[in-house]
Each structure stands twice: as structure tokens, then as C-alpha cells.
Image (cartoon, helix red, strand yellow):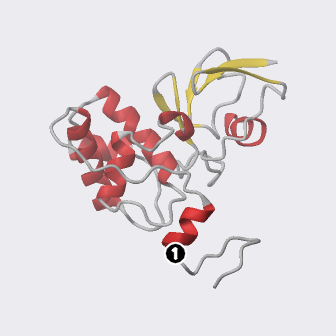
Amino acid sequence: MTSMTVNGRPVRFLMDPETPLLWALRDAANLTGTKYGCGVGDCGACMVQVDGEALRSCLITIAEAEGRFITTIEGLSRDRTHPVQQAMVAEQAIQCGFCTPGIVMAASALLEKTASPSEAEIKAAIPNLCRCGVYPRLARAIERAGRVARRQERISAAPVPGISAADAAREVPALGIPGEESD
């Protein structure tokens, strides 16, 4: 049995200790924001924070994570109000979204250590691959998130998740609600 703290909660995994943390998070803890990309540490889609350091969860076993504090994208901010999340949206640095959780985790770890990172520090700290090519906007988003974290700038918040099906159908008439007839 392997124990650690995941997103502020104690967790015990009854899995082989050599299981990559990625699979324990996704399959056992149902924290699917951590993505499987390459499985060999090249892409960064599986990036999480381990004791505040951005690490690729496909390269760390649950035995190596024993007793440590793990933060996934789900634990960073439940309502998407973390400065990095807000800046990524504001700078339109999200395309398909597959790599976004890993990038956000790496960027938030960087900003915890360096409140005002240089472009070179950003490039060094964000090893993630993005097939959509958002890199120029990504650097601007991280710089902006730093300003927000330092309270030098504000970003109007994106809507919080959890809109109801009825509200979505009213906003977008092409969507229907199962069981309700349209006029």
C-alpha cells in the first residue's frame, strides 16, 4: 500500500509500487486531467507538481511518490481562477487543450519559484510539447499570470464550470434537453 497526499487529501493506492504515478492518478483516483501523451517523459502532458516541483508523472512511480504532496490540475483551482489558467484563456494560449493541464502545472510551479520570470526562464521551465504551436502566446500568458499573481494586473474571470444542461440549451438553442419537446 502506497500513501501520499493528492490535492490536499490523504490517498492510499493498493497497486504495484512500480506503477507510474500517472496511471494511479488517472485509473485509481479518476483524476483524468493529467494526460497520457508519450509515456516516456518527452511531451509533458502528464505534468503534475510533486512537493511543488513540476514532474512528469509517467516517469515517477507511486513508490517514489510515497509520503509526498501531489497536486494535479484538478487540485490547482476548482473554479479555474488560478492566474495561469486565467492568463492562458485571456491570451488565447489554448487550442485543442490536450497539453494545457501539463503546461499549466509547469507554469504555476515556475511562478511559485520566480514571480517575474524572464523569457529564457519560461522556455527552460516549460518543456511541454504543444502540437498546436501556442508557444508565443504561452510565454505572454505566463508573463501575464505573473503580473496577476503579483497583483499588478487583473483578468476578468472566465465563466466557472458547471453550467446546467437547461441553461446551456437556453444559451445555445441548437442544443436540446432530452425529454423536453421544442416548440
Q: Residue at x 47, y 37 (%)?
A: 77
Q: Nearer the viewer, residue 92 or 78?
A: 78
Position of the N terminus, as image quadrant, is top right
Q: Find disc 1 in the rendering and name its residue.
A: 172
Q: Residue furthest left?
A: 152
Q: Nearer the viewer, residue 153 or 130?
A: 153
Position of the C terminus, as image quadrant, is bottom right
Residue 83, compared with residue 71, is above or below; it is below
Q: Residue furthest bottom?
A: 183
Relative placement, left or right, of 163 versus 118 is: right
Q: Nearer the viewer, residue 24 or 82?
A: 82
**Label 1 environment density (alpha carbons within 10 Å; few <14, some 14–19, many ≥20):** few
* Quarter of the figure with residue 13: top right
Q: Amino acid at mark 1?
A: Val
Relative placement, left or right, of 118 versus 80 is: left
Coordinates of residue 155 in the picture (x, y in percent) = 25, 48
* Quarter of the figure with residue 14: top right
Coordinates of residue 113 in the picture (x, y in percent) = 32, 26
Q: Residue at x 53, y 40 (%)?
A: 73
* Quarter of the figure with residue 107: top left
Residue 115, compared with residue 93, is above or below; it is above
Q: How many discs appear?
A: 1
Q: Residue furthest top?
A: 67
Coordinates of residue 173 in the picture (x, y in percent) = 54, 79
Q: Secondary structure at mark 1?
A: loop
Q: Residue at x 56, y 39 (%)?
A: 74
Relative placement, left or right, of 94 versus 114 is: right
Relative placement, left or right, of 36 versus 2 is: left
Coordinates of residue 87 in the picture (x, y in percent) = 31, 50
Q: Residue at x 55, y 50 (%)?
A: 45
